[in-house]
Image: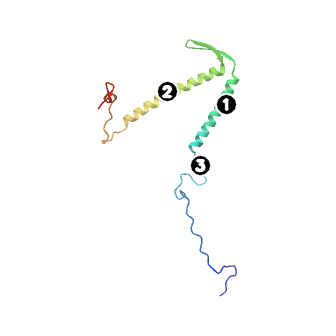
Amino acid sequence: MQTDPLTPRTSIPPPPARQPAIGAGTPSSRPIGGPPHPTRAGLVWTATVTVLVLLGLLIVFILQNQEQVYVQYFGLAGSLPLGIALSIAAVFGGLLVAITGAIRIAQLRTAATRLQPRSPARPPTKTRHQLFRHGHPAK
């Protein structure tokens, strides 16, 4: 019986199977090599950079529009730079949109809670009048 001189005389057992990393056996919601899921910190960072860029553009806009204009609004009158006047108008327009949107969201939430089916185990909620009689909680 001839032996190969390059083969060692003792047999070395194969290395044990590697244990998968924690969470490696669970299916991922993204394919391997796909883009990573955005994190909350990443979204905050992106929002911060976006706001800073927009503020920079707003500063440039205000600095380039320094001509004095005369503005009248519901009895108020005055002279101020054009860039400032337009910025104030944009802020008030944004507030108007935000208030209108908040009112509409409140309406939709109220309608959604009215349309939810009540489970038989849950008693009906008390009205404000039932909860507070003469300024004191009802017993």
Residue 100 shows which numbered tag? 2
Which amino acid does the dot numbered 2 rest on? Thr
In this view, the residue in front, 27 or 133, is 133
Q: Residues within 10 Å of mark 3 (few under 14, many from 20)?
A: few
Task: Tell me the quadrant of the picture where the C terminus can be found.
Answer: top left
Look at 62% across and 22% down and name the residue there: 86
Where is residue 40 shown, x and y percent of the image?
56, 43
Instruction: Say above or below: 14 vs 117.
Output: below
Image quadrant of residue 11? bottom right
Task: Tell me the quadrant of the picture where the N terminus can be found.
Answer: bottom right
Q: What distance separates the C-alpha of mark 3 from that of mark 2? A: 36 Å
* Residue that numbered label 3 is attached to: 36
Which amino acid does the dot numbered 1 rest on? Gly
Instruction: Say above or below: 36 vs 50.
Output: below
> Circles 3 and 2: CB distance less than 8 Å?
no
In this view, the residue in front, 100 or 15, is 15
Q: Residues within 10 Å of mark 1 (few under 14, many from 20)?
A: few
Instruction: Say above or below: 95 vs 113.
Output: above
* Label tally: 3
Q: What distance separates the C-alpha of mark 3 from that of mark 1? A: 30 Å
Which amino acid does the dot numbered 3 rest on? Pro
Look at 44% across and 31% down and name the residue there: 106
Where is residue 116 shown, x and y percent of the image?
37, 38
* Residue that numbered label 1 is attached to: 56
Under circle 2, the secondary element is helix
Look at 69% across and 18% down and name the residue there: 67
Look at 54% across and 54% down and name the residue there: 28
Under circle 1, the secondary element is helix
Q: Earlier in the sequence, mark 3 or mark 2?
A: 3
